[in-house]
Image (cartoon, grey):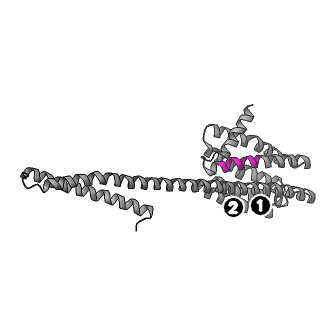
Amino acid sequence: MRIIRGLKNVLGVIKDTDRKISDRIFVLLTLLAVAAGAAALIGDLITKENIYEIIVLIGTVLFIPVITFICLHKNRIDIAIRLVVLGIVFIILPTIFFFGGGLMGGGVLWFIFAFLYIGLVLSGRWRSVMITLLCLLAFLFYQVGYYHPEYVVNHTRKMFYLDSFLSLILVGGVCFVMVLFQNRIYQEENARAKKETERAEELNRSQNRFFSSMSHEIRTPINSILGLNELILREPDASDEITKDAAGIQGAGKMLLALINDILDFSKIEAGSMD
């Protein structure tokens, strides 16, 4: 039951649009890598591949999901990403290359998967460093395979064709699924962005309607106040104090009316009905 619950949690992370895209890609790509590793393990057992490569594949299939589940539970997926990348670069790839026939095996194709994996799940300095290390390791492996072929476990011609074909299918399948998933994520993000833009535009239109209505409603009583105040100013027998207060009311009222007119003008400009 715990395994099923954990699997549901992992699938929930993949479908959770509120999570970072890199986290969702990491979880999906890790599941694909584990599935590909399991398929490669079955193929190695059938073809009786080197025992060291089989042991590493068993460890990969067992420990990578455990690390991923633990880090997801503790909400430290960044640690899981780095641990898995380090394991791929410094454990899995060297083992597949040196115990899987070198250039006469399918290990070279898994370098393509490693480049894809690092490029999708890492970012910033970590991505630059790991890509550089992966390039250096590939160069080193080729040098060792060329100048010291005795360090590489050779494959027979039949084993080479079987291993390379299986690796081609697995790596190609992983890349194919990842491209589909990437396209789906981008479509979801574009749809969300479009929806948010429509909501923002509707909010802006509602705001403009509110300001326009408010401006009209406020101008009416202000004009009434100014009109009545004008009658006071025209009274011939009004005292100086009353006249002074009425003049102050007139100045403040006209200033307030100018502000209201500016608000109304801005709302018209934003609505596109005024240049």
Residue tagged by mark 1? 144
Gap in angstroms between the C-alphas marked 2 and 1: 14 Å
Q: Quadrant of the C terminus?
A: bottom left
Disc 2, SS:
helix
Give the image location of residue 75, x and y in percent. 60, 40
**Relative depth, front residue between 116 and 12:** 12
User: Element type at marker 1?
Assistant: helix
Which residue is at the front of the view, 151 or 220?
Answer: 220
Above or below, comparing residue 35 to residue 166 in the picture = above
Find residue 45 and report its horizontal and vertical position in percent: 88, 46
Q: For the residue carrying disc 2, how many other residues have a C-alpha within 10 Å: few (<14), some (14-19), or many (20+)?
A: few
Magenta stretch, residue numbers: 24-34
* Identity of the residue drawn at 86% across and 46% down: 42
Residue at (63%, 48%) from the top-left corner? 23
Q: Which mark is residue 54?
A: none
Q: Position of residue 112 (x, y in %)?
A: 74, 59
Q: According to the image, label 2 marks what residue?
A: 135
Q: Is 253 colored magenta in this rendering?
A: no
